[in-house]
Amino acid sequence: MKTFPKLMLIVCFVSSIFALAQNAYPQNYFRNPLNIPMQLAANFGAIRTNHFHMGLDLRTNSQENLPVVAAAEGYVSRIKIERYGFGNAVYITHPNGYTTVYAHLNKYFDRLDEYVKEQQYKDEKWEQDINFQPGQFPVEKGQQIALSGNTGGSAGPHLHFEIRDTKTEECLNPLLFGFNIPDNIAPIITGLYWYDRRFSTYEPGANAIAVKKAGNAYTSDVVRVSSPMISFAIKAVDKANQGFNLGIYHAELLMDGKLVYGFSIDKVSYDDTRYINGCIDYTKFVRDKMSIQHLSSLPGMKLKNYSQPNWSGIINLQDENIHNIEIILKDVSGNTSRLATKVQLGKVADETSPTSKTVMPNEGKTITTENAEINFSKNAVYDAVNFNMYEKQDADLNSVSNSIVLHNPYIPVQDDYTLKIKPSRKLTSDEKDKVVVLLNYGSDTNVVKGKWNGDKVEAQFNRLGNAKLITDHNLPSVSSSWKGGALVNSSSLRLRGTTKIGDIISLRAELDGKWLRFARVKDDFVYAFDEKCPKGSGSHTLKVTTINTAGNTNTQTFTFQK
C-alpha cells in the first residue's frame, strides 16, 4: 500500500477543504446584477471598520442610475430604507434557498417604488423596513428591479451585492458561485509581524519583519524572537485584475511542514461580523490605517466558520533551533502566493504581568473611579487588556463632569459596555433633562442621551476613548437652499441640518399642514417634488420640526412658490 508523507497529507487535507468550499454552491445560477461586465471595487471579507465587507462592491463606471437586474428568478421579500448602511436596498428570495441583496440604490422599479411611497406617506415616516409575501412582487431573472446609486453609507456610486442563506441569513462569499470575473493575479504580501503571546497581542504589540520578493515568492531574514510563545500576522492585499485593494480569501501557516493555522472567508453572519476586530491588529488598523490579519486565534475571538478550532496558530518554541515557517495565501481563483522564512528563539524578554484592572477575555469585569464605573461583559475583549481608567478635569463650559479616560481608542471591544458617570455638581431638573454623554474616540465622537440611574448617568458604547457629561440647551435647526417666498424651479427642496452637540434624530416636515416625504441624505434632508407639490401649484408654507439628541425641539417655517 502506498503511503504519503505527513506534509503531503496535510496539504491535501487543506486543499480538499478549499476545493469543497468553492464547489458547495450552485455554479452559474446567479447572473451579473448589472448589464455591464462585473468589476470589483471590494470583495467579500475585505477589512472594514468593525465589520467584514459582506458582499461584492460592483463598479458602475462612476455613474448612478444604471439598471440593476434580478440575479435569478424569485420575489422581492423585503425593502429597507435608511440614512446610513445600505441606504435604499432590495432583497430577493430565490427558490433554491438563497436571498440576494442589492444596496445603495437610487430608485426601485416603478410598481415597487409607488408601493413604498404610499407606505411612507401612510406611516408619515421616510425610513422603512417592509417584508413582502411571495405573490406581491415576483421577478424573473434579468428583470430590472432598481437603479443604482450612492445612498446610505456609500462613498461613491456603486452597487453592493450580497448572497445570503435564506434560512440562516448568513452572508456567503458570492465569488464561490461561479461569476465570470477574470483574475490571474496572486495576493501581494507587503508585511510580516510577530507577537509575544505569553500575555496579550496588545502589549507590547506587533514586531515588524521586512519582507522581500524573490521572483514569484516572498522571503525574509531569519526572525529572531524574544518569547518562546509567539504568533504571526500578515499584511497583504488581493489586487485581482482591476487595481482595487481586495481582501485576502484564504491563508495557511505552517511550521516545519506542519499546518498550525488557516482561515477562509466563506461565510459570515451580521451577528458575528464585528469579530473582525479579533482577526486583525486593531491598533494598527485604527491608529496607522494598516490592515494586518492575525494568523492565530485570539482567546475572545468567536467567529464561526473562519478557522478550525484546533488550529490556534500559537507557536511554542521549545529550543533555540532554526525552524521553517511558510505562509500560503490564495484567492478564490486559486492564485497563490508563498512567503518562506525561518524563526529562532533568542534571549527571552521579561513577561508582562496582569494587574487588578486587567480585563480578560471570557470574563466580566467592573472597574471604578471616584465618580465613574464601567461594566464589561464576558464577551467584551478579544485579548487581555491592562485597562487604564482615570478621571481628569475638563475645561469645556458645557461639561458637568470630569472627563473619564477609558484606556485608549486603539483597543477594541466586541459588545456594548455600560458606563456610569456622576456629575461634578448638583444639577437642576432642567439641566438633568438635557444631559448627554459624549464619547470622544479620536477620529470621531458619539453622543447619546443616556438615562439616570441614582446619582449617575448611564449609557452604553462599543468604543473606548474619553467620556464626559454635557448639558445641551442648543436648538437644532435647518437652513433652506432657497430664499423665502422664492419661485423654486429645481427638481427638489434641500434642507441642511445643524446641531451643536450630537445629531438631529428627528425631522418632521409639513407642507400646508400635511406631512411631506423628506429623505435623509447624509446631513441634508431632500424632498423630490411629486404630486404632493406639482408645478404651478402656487405659494406654499413648509413647517419643519427638528429634535436633537438632547431632546431639544425647534420649529421653523419656510415659504416658496412652485
Image: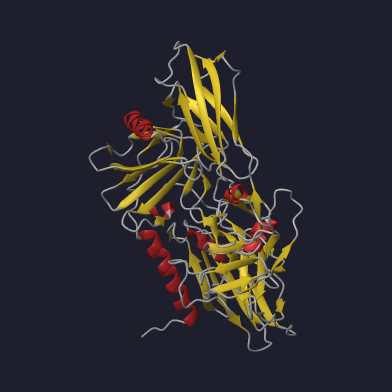
Q: Which residue: 43% across, 23% down?
A: 513
Question: Residue 258 location, x and y as percent?
Answer: 53, 79
252 or 391: nearer the viewer = 391
Total count of labels: 0
1 or 442: nearer the viewer = 442
Q: Is residue 446 above or below residue 143?
A: below
Q: Is residue 307 left or right of residue 192?
A: left
Q: Which residue: 50% across, 58% down?
A: 331
Q: Is residue 58 left or right of residue 467?
A: left
Q: Which residue: 71% across, 76% down?
A: 222
284 or 515: nearer the viewer = 515
Q: How is the image coloured?
A: secondary structure
Q: Is residue 372 left or right of residue 521?
A: right
Q: Quadrant of residue 22?
A: bottom left
Question: Residue 135 location, x and y as percent?
Answer: 22, 40
Q: Is residue 363 above or below residue 237?
A: below
Question: Residue 7 location, x and y as percent?
Answer: 50, 79
Residue 178: tell me if it is visible: no
Question: Residue 88 location, x and y as percent?
Answer: 44, 39
Q: Which residue: 49% across, 45% down?
A: 85
Residue 4: tell me if it is visible: yes
Q: Quadrant of residue 212?
A: bottom right
The single residue placed furthest to the bottom in the displayed view is 319
548 or 340: nearer the viewer = 548
Location of the N terminus (image quadrant): bottom left
